[in-house]
């Protein structure tokens, strides 16, 4: 099978999947709109130490209000949940951003005045439901002016892209790149990802840099 045929079938699968999810989301989603989540999931290393009882309790002290938590950055994990099914939850990590990213195909490159950016995600389903979605349709990048960019079907030398669809059993972990085509000179500011093939109300957001 030629590379062109594989890409055509992949594009057709993506479009069909996106259409079906759109129809389902329109019929079932009544929660009132998306919300952006920027809170990184706390790890064991960052959690406060438990009180072992070895030292006497200190008297209560008045403390200044806790400073606002810094937004999640590249490398952090955000716990996400879907909208259509409560069992659709996952820990998603924006692992790294490769900017610019070089195409694996010399005949398939970014348009004049543009270049590819590749973002690697790690997905770990945490609920009873396995992850069986298309990360390609779930991610976006946003520049410092607030302009968002959707993904492209290109593959780059940054690393393997996610398969279409991607299937990950609950408790297991999968990694892959999503590729974007952006104008030269663009300064990217954020990475976004949501479940339900991008239609979940909760949107995870990571700060770049």
Image (cartoon, rainbow, N blue to C red):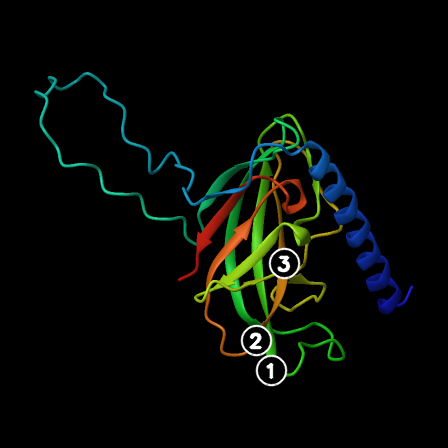
- Left or right of 164 in this view: 145: left
Q: Distance between the residues labelled 3 and 1?
A: 20 Å
2 above or below 194? below
Tell whether label 2 touches label 1 (CB within 8 Å).
yes
Characterize the local packing of mark 2: few (<14), some (14-19) or many (20 or more) Cα atoms within 10 angstroms: some
Q: Where is residue 82 in the image (x, y as percent from the top left)?
A: 60, 35
Q: Which residue is more in the foreground, 144 or 2? A: 144
> What residue occupies the far right of the structure in this picture?
1
Q: Which residue is more in the foreground, 145 or 45? A: 145
Q: Name the residue under label 1.
A: 113
167 above or below 89? below
Q: How far apart are marks 2 and 3 (CA)?
A: 17 Å
Q: Which residue is drawn at 82% across and 52% down?
A: 13
* Local secondary structure at mark 2: strand
Q: Mark 2 points at which residue?
A: 183
How many badges with numbers are in the image? 3
Image mark for residue 41: none
184 above or below 63? below
- Pick whichever of labels 3 and 1 is earlier in the sequence: 1
* Local secondary structure at mark 3: strand
* Local secondary structure at mark 1: loop
Q: Where is residue 53 in the image (x, y as percent from the top left)?
A: 19, 16
Tell whether label 1 touches label 3 (CB within 8 Å).
no
68 above or below 12? above
Eye-nearest disc, 2 or 3:
2
Q: Where is residue 111 in the image (x, y as percent from the top left)?
A: 67, 79
Q: Name the residue under label 3.
A: 178
Q: In which quarter of the image is the C terminus?
A: bottom left
């Amino acid at each position: 099978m030629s590379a062109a045929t594989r890409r055509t079938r992949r594009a057709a699968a993506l479009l069909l999947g996106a259409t079906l999810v759109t129809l389902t989301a329109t019929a079932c989603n009544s929660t009132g709109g998306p919300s952006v989540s920027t809170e990184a999931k706390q790890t064991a290393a960052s959690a406060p130490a438990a009180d072992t009882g070895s030292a006497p309790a200190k008297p209560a002290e008045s403390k200044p209000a806790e400073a606002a938590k810094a937004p999640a950055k590249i490398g952090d994990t955000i716990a996400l949940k879907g909208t259509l099914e409560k069992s659709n939850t996952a820990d998603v990590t924006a692992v790294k951003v490769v900017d610019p990213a070089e195409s694996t195909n010399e005949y398939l490159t970014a348009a004049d005045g543009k270049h590819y950016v590749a973002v690697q995600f790690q997905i770990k389903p945490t609920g009873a439901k396995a992850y069986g979605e298309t990360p390609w349709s779930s991610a976006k990048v946003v520049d410092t002016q607030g302009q968002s960019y959707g993904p492209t079907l290109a593959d780059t030398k940054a690393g393997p892209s996610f398969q279409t669809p991607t299937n990950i059993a609950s408790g297991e972990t999968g990694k892959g790149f999503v590729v974007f085509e952006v104008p030269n000179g663009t300064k990217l500011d954020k990475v976004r990802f949501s479940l339900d093939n991008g239609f979940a109300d909760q949107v995870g957001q990571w700060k770049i840099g």
